[in-house]
Structures are given as C-alpha cells and as structure tokens.
Amino acid sequence: MNEVRKPPVATTGIIGWLRINLFFNWTNSLITLFVIYCLYQFIPWILDWTIFSADFKYNYLGEQITNQEMCSRNLDPENGGACWAVIYVRFYQFIYGFYPKVEVWRVNVAYVMLALALLPLLYAKLPYRKYFLYFTYIFPVIAYFLLNGGLGFTEVSTNKWGGLLVTLVLGCTGIALAFPIGIMLALGRRSKLPVISMMCTLFIEFIRGVPLITLLFFGMVMLPLFLPEGIDMDGLVRVLVAVTLFQSAYMAEVIRGGLQAIPPGQYEAAKSLGMSYWRMNLLIILPQAIRISIPPIVNTSIGLFKDTTLVIIVGILDLLGIGRGTLADTNWLGLSYEIYFFVSLVFFIFTFGMSRYSLYLEKKLKTGINMGAD
Amino acid sequence: MKKLLSIFAVVAFAFSANAGTLDDVKNRGFLKCGVTTGLAGFAAPDDNGEWAGLDADMCRAVAVAVFGDRSKVEFITTTGKSRFPTLASGEVDMLARNTTWTISRDVNLGFEFVGVNFYDGQGFMVPSALGVSSATELDGATVCIQTGTTTELNLADFFRLNGISYEALPIETNDEGKENLFAGRCDVYTTDASGLSSTRAAASNPDKWVVLPEIISKEPLGPLVRHGDHQWGDVVRWSLNAMIIAEELGITSENVDAQTSSNVPEVLRLLGVEGNYGEMLELSNDWAYQIIKQIGNYSESYEANVGPDTPLEIARGLNALWTQGGILYAPPFR
C-alpha cells in the first residue's frame, strides 16, 4: 500500500509561492525587498496626496473652493494634497466642452446610445443581439443628428464641442471607419490586379510615411486654402478625415499581416469548392486573418485613441486641450499636477478597458492555438 | 514656407475680397474671432465655458460694435502655427491672439494690424533670494531660454551690449522653463513679460520670484484682419480705439449713461449723441456707447484680466495712457 504523501510545505500554498516567485535566490530576494521598500515609500505618499490630504470640493477651512488660492495646499504649503476642486468645478467642460447647457441632454443620450451600440459588439451572447446590431449600424447617423443638429434639433457648431466628447468622437469614428477601409486596402495591396495593388500600396506607404501631425496640419491649414470661398469644410470634419486616413493605413498593414499568416491551403480549399473571390475572403480568409490580428488591431486602436490629443496643435480642444485651457485661466494657474493626473486617468480607463477587452476576445476565440497549418 | 503661405493668402484674398467682411458678419449674425487655445490673462475659458481675457474682450468689443450684443461672437481656437492660415482662408473674421506686429506679418503675409492692445516685451525672472535688482547684474548666470525663438537672439544681443557673460540652458516649452527655474537648474528665465507674470503666478509661492525691470525687446500685440477690406479693418481699429479714448475721457461702464449728458464735445461724439460717426462705419450710432457699456474702457478690461489686482499682477507700464507715462495713444475722435 502506497501512502500518498503531501508535497513539502515549502513548495505549496502561500509560502511555496513566495519562495518560488519572490525569494528564489539571493538576488531575487534582494530585488523583492528593494521593490517592497519603494512601494512602502511611494504608496502612502500617493494615497495621501490623491485622497487623504486632498481637497475635493471644500478646503480644510470648510470653504467651497472657487480658485487656486483657496486650495489647502496654497493656503498652507506644509499641508494639503491635490486640489481636485478644479476638476469638480470644470467637470462639465472636461466632459462636454462648450456645448450649450440646455442642449447637453443630447450629448448624454449619445453617450448612453454609444454604450448600447457597443454592447452587441462586446457580448456575443447578448439576447436579441440581432436587433441590437441593427441599432449599432444606424447609431452613427443618429449620433450625427443628435450632436450636430438638424431634424428639428438646433444646430450646435463643432467648435462648441470639446473635452471627452471630441476625444470620443475622434477615437470612435477613426477606429470604426478605419476598420473597413483598412480591410479593403489590405486586400487591394495583395490583389493580383497591378493597378489596384499599386494604388493601395502607394496610399499606404504615403500615409505611413508622414507623421499624424503632418496630416492634421494639411487638413487644417492647407485644405481650406484650396477650397473655393463659400465651401466651408468644418474643422472637426477635416481633422476626422486626416485621423481616419492615418488609421486606415496602419489598420491595412495590420490586417495584411494577418492575411499573410493564412496558409495557401486555405485559399486552395476555398477555390476548389468553387467560391468566388469575395466569398472566399469573407467566409474563409478574413475571419481567420482578423482573429489572429486582434492584438495588433487593438494596439493601433489604443495608439490612435491617445494620438487624438495631437488635435490641440490645430486648435481643437479635446480632453487634454480643455485641461490646458483650464491651466491658462488665472483662477486655476499652477494646478497642472491635478489636471494632468485627471486627464491621464481618463485616458487610462479607456485604453485599459480596450486592452482587457482584447484579452477577453483572444481567450474566447482561442487565437493562441495554431490553426489549420498542419 | 512663408512665401508659399503668402501665395495662398493672396489666392484666398482674391476669393474673399469680393464681399465685404462687415456684410458677411452681419448676414451671418455673429462674429468669428480667432483666439489662442489658452493664455492666462489674454484668452482662456472660465468656469462657465465663457472666454475671458484681454483678447477675448477685444473680440467682444467688435461684436458689440456690429450687433450691440457681447454674446454674438464665436471664438475659434488657433495655435501659433494655425492662426495665419485660419485668418487668410476666411475661417475667422479677425484674430485677437497675442500676435506680435512685425513687418513681415503685416506686409508679406497679407494682413493688416489695426492697432496694439498690449505692449509686451522680453523680460527676466529670477528668484528673489538671488538678490538681483537689475538684469545688468546677471554676469555668469545660467539662463533658461526657448530655442529657435527671437527671444534667444534678443538675449544674446542684450548680454553682448552690456559686456556680461551667461550660460544658456536650452528649453522647448514654457512649462519646461518653469520647471527648470523652480527646480533651480537655471538662475534666470527669460520670455515675454506677460508670460513671466503667469509663470510667477503659477508658482506655489509667487513672492519668491521677481520680474526684473529691464524689457529688452518690442512685442506689440494687437488684433489683425485680412488685407484689402479697409471698411472691416476700420471697424476693428475703431472698436479698439473707442476703448482707449473712453479711458482718456474718463468714461467707464458705470458712468457711461451719465456721460451722455456731458458737456465735453468729444464725449458726445464718441457716445453717438452728436455727429454720425457710426453711420460712417456702417454701424449704429451708439456703437461706442455699447462697447463701453457692455465691455468697459481699456483700463477696465486691463484691470480685470491682467492688472495688478489679478494673479498676473502686470503693472500698466508701457500700457498706461500717454498722459500717464505709457505709450497708449489713440487718434482723436472727430
């Protein structure tokens, strides 16, 4: 009779985990201790600054803060942490820009609708997903009329838009439009028809060859000079065009990478079944290619979302632009730590959400498994 | 690039010159005014999302002159690079964007500066602990200086003229200059005096820093319009002048109603009680009255936005009236 003996205590449970991961040998232990020391120094300080000593709406005297001189840390430099009152007072501007207050419900409705439109894309098991998807398709049209005006809504010109609204409009439109355009460009570049493949290659290489700033400048500064008087292309639209073109070129290359990973056997199998070019690509090739391209697709999308902050240089006030505008208000001079912290936190929430979602997708679609090659 | 821009400007001008800007503005129902994306005291959004500042007041004054309503203006944010093409292409009717009046901008770019609403100039800021009271005492100092700007050349000239040496610490942005000065990596920070004031106001303890009295360059900042539309240029020019003349005559937003029964002829002309100066400009006759009533005179705008009682604490200096030691001077209103 063999008695089953438990593994030694030192290799299981918390102690085992600690031994293996943190204190495996002396260099390992030294690094662990050093990191713990750094965290010990840093975490209490950052918690104290951001939460415990911070002003949220009132300073330590109990007054409501309306300018930077009333922040606890400016009244008493020895005490006081962050002065979040600036975010509290300016919250409306950070979220909606200069959108008129009476019309702001339209933006709120658009935000809620955006969440609803994203739902069927994010959860495949959603009940009545089909109907939700229909909504997703018409959402851009609804959002356009809702935000911009028309169909009975008063018009709100885009230079009143700002803050998170502009960031989301740029990010969502750029990512959503670049995806189909990118697929077409990727297929075009691999096409056997020389004219199509050359045009796509030229487009992609040209756009990838210049920085986004250049495209933004071109859209903002040069384009209006070429347009005849009277044809007034909206500033935000010009930027949107530049952002979408830029993102499409990158998306095309990402998807082309996916296409190249598909073994020729898949093409041959599809052709031997008598499938046309489009049926082959839509049903056999693209679903596999896109699946393996998910990490780089999310990668470039996150990159674009952060790149939207560049629109400040053409005078559009996105989330970061509103922050910098706030810093130029004599009431709030010198609160740059608070404002940049808040802006980066908002960006982090969105980009981290995107990256977690891509991980979930990869798990669900099991992209890690080598498909069909052998 | 500049040549290219001026060619474009001429092309754009050829398109835009056929209709008067004043009529365009009137038909549109509001003024489009180009401002900065945010510069303390000159143009920045306040807590309610309203643009405020010296330049924003300039825009509002023109809107009041045309419509009699300070809210009939749409602010278009522009950056240092996008401001000129934005104006040249007709996207904005005027710029009030802390823009220095220089010959190349006035002539080569095809714009018309209609006046000066702030006389700025390059200055120095040092820690008060340094115990320096004049820039000529800065021998051997480390200076934070934005590279590739006119300030860099002005600095070199100034130190050479005074026969003293310095060590340059090149920086790219205003924020970088601020951080370097506050961290003690340089002894002196030099940029436009108004910029120094906002840097000082942003410090945790402004009293620890002093702006030295020397101003070593001319930076006249003023509103500008496109070449070729003199009627519109006149409207903007006299909107600014009306504010300056109002200060000369002692008319404020508070006493303007009482002043309409004044016995000073120029006051009566300015407020539209006598004469038909509004008609000449194709505006209503009380246009200047409305500017003073709704915006205030130059001094009121200055004190509210950049003056000694604001965090910027910029003394009137050159921007005082010519009768009070400054160089602010408007042509007579007759």
Image: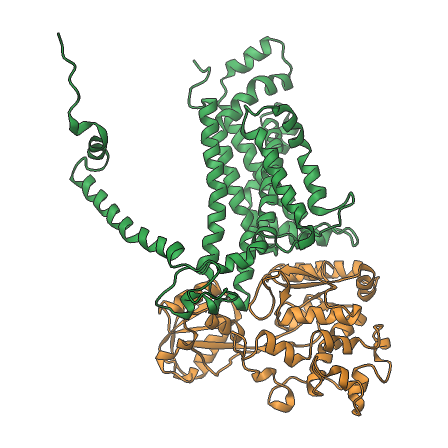
Chain colours: A green, B orange
- Where residue A358 sits in the image (x, y, percent)? 48, 32
Most extreme residue toward the front is A62
Is B254 located above or below residue A44 in the figure? below
Q: Nearer the viewer, residue B277 or A248?
A: B277
- Where residue B224 sits in the image (x, y, percent)? 69, 70
Is A17 located above or below residue A219 in the figure? above
Is B116 located above or below residue A130 in the figure? below
Residue placed at 45% from the left, 22% from the top?
Answer: A366
Locate residue A8 relative to residue A265 in the image: left or right: left
The quadrant where residue A280 appears: top right
Locate residue B11 relative to residue A78 in the image: left or right: right
Q: Nearer the viewer, residue B255 or B267?
A: B255
Residue placed at 56% from the left, 66% from the top?
Answer: B39
The quadrant where residue B166 appears: bottom left
- Where residue B246 sits in the image (x, y, percent)? 71, 83
Q: How many marks?
A: 0
The quadrant where residue B222 appears: bottom right
Residue placed at 16% from the left, 14% from the top?
Answer: A4
- Where residue A341 sits in the image (x, y, percent)? 45, 54
Q: Is residue B229 visible?
A: no
Q: Quadrant of the C terminus of chain B?
A: bottom right
Q: Nearer the viewer, residue A2 or A189?
A: A2
Residue placed at 42% from the left, 77% from the top?
Answer: B207
Q: Quadrant of the N terminus of chain B?
A: bottom right
Q: Is residue A323 visible?
A: yes
